[in-house]
Amino acid sequence: MDKMLSQLPVRLDDIYQAQELLAGIAEKTPVESSRALGRQIGSDVFFKCENLQRAGSFKVRGAYVRMARLSPQDRDRGVVAASAGNHAQGVAVAAKALGIKARIYMPLGVALPKLAATQGHGAEVVLHGHNVDEALAEAQRYAEQSGAVFVHPFDNVDVVSGQGTIGLEILEQIPDVETVVMGVGGGGLLAGVAVAIKSRARELGRPIRIIGVQAENAAAYPPSLAADALVPLTKVSTMADGIAVGRPGQIPFSIIRELVDDVVTVSEDSLARALIFLLERSKMVVEPAGAVGVAALLDGTLNLDGAKPGTTAVILSGGNIDPMLMLKVIQRGLSAAGRFMTVRMLLDDRPGSLATISRIIAESDANVTGVDHTRVGGSISMGDVSITVNMETKGHEHCEQVLMNLRAEGFQPIVVH
């Protein structure tokens, strides 16, 4: 183990040096316990709140370490980066602190709050491409043409070292931690924390598990680890834009395959449920990429060979969520939990039908929040009307009871959500 750790591209000493560089720059973010989640999994659970970090995510750590180590000549050339938002803001904050000119490429359709925040920190923003990988390629081309220093979001030893400082803080704040769970996109965070945790665990003489979590529609690590080679995805589609990366970084991959115990995946519905859980039970605003670890715990998908995770730390890696996305996620999360349902019904266009439906729903103890009533449409016959009803419900069993009561009165509801 010692020999293997010494041969990795990032070592524990690199992370300690990064921690010294970050003094006064990155916040030592708080750790909050979650009794509600702990009860569900049967172990103590703590959240490492990087959603409360400067610029709203852990990314400022790696970006600052990378840029602080540039020579005066390189600083004069400026830096260029690409990101869907969090790395962009981290680079912008670091550049402002170091007095370096920054140009950031962001994908078309990037969340407006992330775009405005990046510009607000003084960086020049260029919109390019439809995903992070396309913006990344354009940023690299610009670096080659202009001489600006390219600051990679994850595939760099200084960046990985900076992210690893979170692992040192977790060990200080939760000395008895047994399992550490976090999201993974390109792998910089997971790799850095794995080096810090596994190296210190070796020194402490006890095992600590490291689990990475990916959105199932943007999961390049499981096939790459299975093949022991980088396997790029042909398509990436997830609400978790912060980890929507189609190809792992070579440096993080070389660390993760050696140190990380497992990488699991979660669905979009699980992500939505996790965000609702964090809002309601922990009063935490977290972006989807920052909630994947919570989603995995709620799903019970961690591969621990039947053992309980023990004292668990979950890294909430960021809190930069677009309010419009939050509205959609809340609705999806409530639907996935059986607390919101939309049904559509075709019925005879005669007085009293809508009143009957309303009565059945009210007697079923559900709450109508919206009704759409139309007589025109390709599937609607003359004399019929289409009714779409949105309602608040109390769980999956309650939804089934509402549907049963509607069917008992002769209606044929089709569940839309």
Image (tube, rainbow, N blue to C red):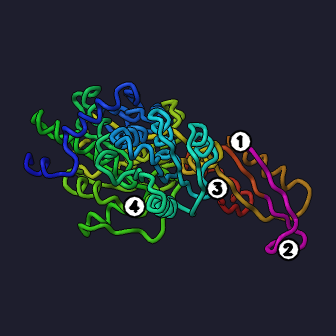
Crowding at mark 2 (Cα within 10 Å: few <14, some 14-19, many 20+): some
What type is the residue that disc 4 sits on? Ala
User: Foreground residue, 332 or 191?
Assistant: 191
Q: CA distance from mark 1 to mark 3?
A: 16 Å
Amino acid type, callout 2: Ser
* First in residue order: circle 2 vs circle 3: 2
Q: Which residue is mark 2?
A: 381
Q: Which residue is mark 1?
A: 367
CA gap between label 4 and label 1 equals: 38 Å
- Figure quadrant of residue 210: top left
Q: Amino acid at mark 3?
A: Met
Query: Whole-Å distance between the Cαs marked 1 and 2?
Result: 29 Å
In this rendering, which labeled residue sits more in front, label 4 or label 3?
A: 4
The one nearer the camera, 262 or 259, is 259
Mark closer to the observer (1, 3)? 1
How far is disc 4 from disc 3 in space, using C-alphas? 39 Å
Comes first in the chain, label 4 or label 1: 4
Amino acid on which the number 1 mark rests in the picture: Asn
Mark before the other along the chain sequence, 1 or 3: 1
User: Range of the magenta residues?
Assistant: 368-387
Label 1 neighbour load within 10 Å: few <14, some 14-19, many 20+: some
Residue lying at 26% horizontally and 40% vertically, measured from the top left:
179
Residue 122 in the image: x percent, y percent?
Answer: 57, 39
Secondary element at image label 4: loop
**370 or 32: which is nearer to us?**
32
Mark number displayed over residue 219: 4
